[in-house]
Image (cartoon, rainbow, N blue to C red):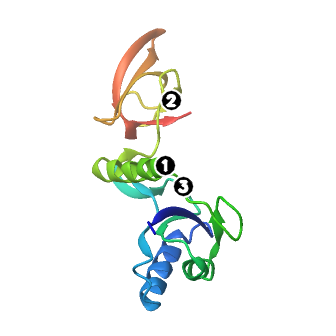
């Protein structure tokens, strides 16, 4: 039987502990042949704090753990009896349904791409009003014109002496109003 991806509902904030507990229990019960990957889908995000860039992890699906497994009574009970597991998502209580291969591939691709290039924690959109918090235009409000995620810069139209002036700033120099 082929291994399929299942979504396991865990207590929010305990996803990593559930992942570790599942891996330990699989090894303890010698059920490695029935289980594949067990992961918490995350991406790396960058935020500016105190003028410094800080990297942190953000979960795509808080409260969920992805488990690649061959479903039978034994593997089902191993997962269900793990502390802080609320159950499976999809299907019925006794017979959970796996996610489709396409869904699983999309999630795994997103995890891979997130590891290569950290995303900013705050996302900006053209037309949005922001406040400049640092630099020569501090305390000015402006409207976002362009966003460059590759360079972590944003072009903002700031009103200076009644005239709209485009200013290019780093993400850390502006905040959402």
x and y percentages locating residue 47 in the rendered image: 40, 49
Q: How many marks?
A: 3
For marks 3 and 2, give the CA distance: 39 Å
Asked which secondary structure carries label 2, the reply is strand
Q: Residue farthest to the front?
A: 1
Q: Residue farthest to the top?
A: 163
Say above or below: 36 vs 134.
Answer: below
Say above or below: 44 vs 38.
Answer: above
For marks 1 and 2, give the CA distance: 35 Å
For marks 1 and 3, give the CA distance: 6 Å
Q: Of discs 3 and 2, which sits in the foreground? A: 3
The reply to whether callout 3 and callout 2 are in contact (CB within 8 Å) is no
Asked which secondary structure carries label 1, the reply is helix
Any mark on residue 130, and which? 2
Q: Nearer the viewer, residue 14 or 67?
A: 67
Residue drawn at x 45%, y 91% is 28
Mark 3: few, some, or many residues within 10 Å (few <14, many ≥20)?
some
Asked which secondary structure carries label 3, the reply is loop
Give the residue at mark 3.
99
Q: Which is nearer the N-term, disc 3 or disc 2? A: 3
Give the residue at mark 1.
103
x and y percentages locating residue 166 in the rendered image: 37, 16
Residue drawn at x 43%, y 47% is 106
Q: Of discs 1 and 2, which sits in the foreground? A: 1
x and y percentages locating residue 16 in the rendered image: 48, 71
Residue drawn at x 49%, y 61% is 5
| Residue 63 visible somewhere in the drawing | yes
The reply to whether callout 1 and callout 3 are in contact (CB within 8 Å) is yes
Q: Which is nearer the N-term, disc 1 or disc 2? A: 1
Q: Nearer the viewer, residue 160 or 23?
A: 23
Q: Nearer the viewer, residue 163 or 15?
A: 15
The reply to whether callout 1 and callout 2 are in contact (CB within 8 Å) is no
């Amino acid at each position: 039987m082929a291994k399929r991806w299942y979504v396991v509902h865990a207590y929010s904030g305990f996803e990593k502990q559930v992942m570790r507990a599942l891996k330990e229990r699989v090894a303890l019960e010698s059920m490695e042949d029935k289980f594949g990957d067990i992961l918490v889908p995350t991406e790396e995000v960058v935020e500016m704090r105190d003028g410094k860039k800080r990297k942190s992890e953000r979960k795509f699906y808080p409260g969920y753990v992805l488990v690649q497994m061959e479903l039978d009574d034994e593997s089902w009970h191993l997962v269900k009896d793990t502390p802080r597991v609320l159950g499976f998502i999809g299907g019925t209580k006794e017979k959970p349904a796996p996610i489709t291969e396409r869904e699983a591939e999309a999630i795994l691709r997103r995890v891979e791409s997130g590891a290569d290039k950290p995303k900013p924690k705050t996302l900006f959109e053209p037309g949005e009003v922001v406040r400049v918090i640092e630099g020569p235009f501090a305390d000015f409000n402006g409207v976002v014109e362009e966003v460059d995620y590759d360079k972590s810069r944003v072009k903002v139209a700031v009103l200076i002496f009644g005239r709209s002036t485009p200013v290019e700033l780093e993400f850390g120099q502006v905040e959402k109003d």
